[in-house]
Amino acid sequence: MKPFFITTAKNLTLIIMPESDAHMDGHPVLTYSYSIYRRDAYTLSQLNQPDKLLQLSKKNNPDYLGYITFEQPGKVFNYVADGEDALSADEVVEVIEEINHFRNTPQLWTL
């Protein structure tokens, strides 16, 4: 699964980074954790470059907003705001809805 962008109702553009890109028998495997960053100046093509991904390290990036873990997909979620800033409760709900849509739409996984 590749990084993807979402925009919240308050026009906050975010980068959602799946924590892994594992494949079994050539098929993508859904990850359960997604890191969240403010978009800043990155484009999707830049995010597909390994050196750009290194710049998105959690420890050295002020745009890091935490991560969401899907304990039971579609039912139980956990948001950890371990960055310098955090999402509001409404933004967390929006992000979860968008990630659920992404997880349920395999055609989006390779864009």
Image (cartoon, rainbow, N blue to C red):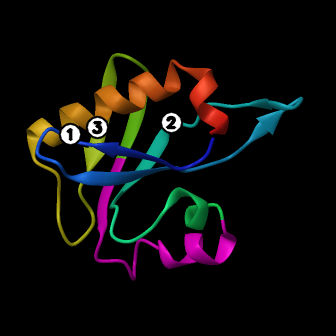
Marks 2/3: CA distance? Answer: 14 Å
Q: Residue at x 10, y 36 (%)?
A: 90
| Helix, strand or loop at mark 1 | helix
* Circle 1 residues within 10 Å: few <14, some 14–19, many ≥20: some
Counting residues from the N terminus, which is met first, the one under dot 2 or under dot 3? 2
| Helix, strand or loop at mark 3 | helix
Residue 26 in the image: x percent, y percent? Answer: 87, 32
Residue 60: quarter of image: bottom left
Q: Which mark is residue 92?
A: 1
Q: Amino acid at mark 1?
A: Val
Marks 1/3: CA distance? Answer: 5 Å
Residue interval drawn in magenta: 49-67
The answer to if 65 sits in the magenta stretch is yes
Looking at the image, can residue 55 be seen? yes
Asked if labels 3 and 1 touch by Cβ distance under 8 angstroms, the answer is: yes
Residue 30 in the image: x percent, y percent? Answer: 61, 31
Residue 88 in the image: x percent, y percent? Answer: 10, 47
Residue 33 in the image: x percent, y percent? Answer: 47, 43
Counting residues from the N terminus, which is met first, the one under dot 2 or under dot 1? 2
> Which residue carries the number 3 mark?
95
- Nearer to us in this view, 60 or 2: 2
Q: Amino acid at mark 3?
A: Val
Q: Residue at x 60, y 61 (%)?
A: 45
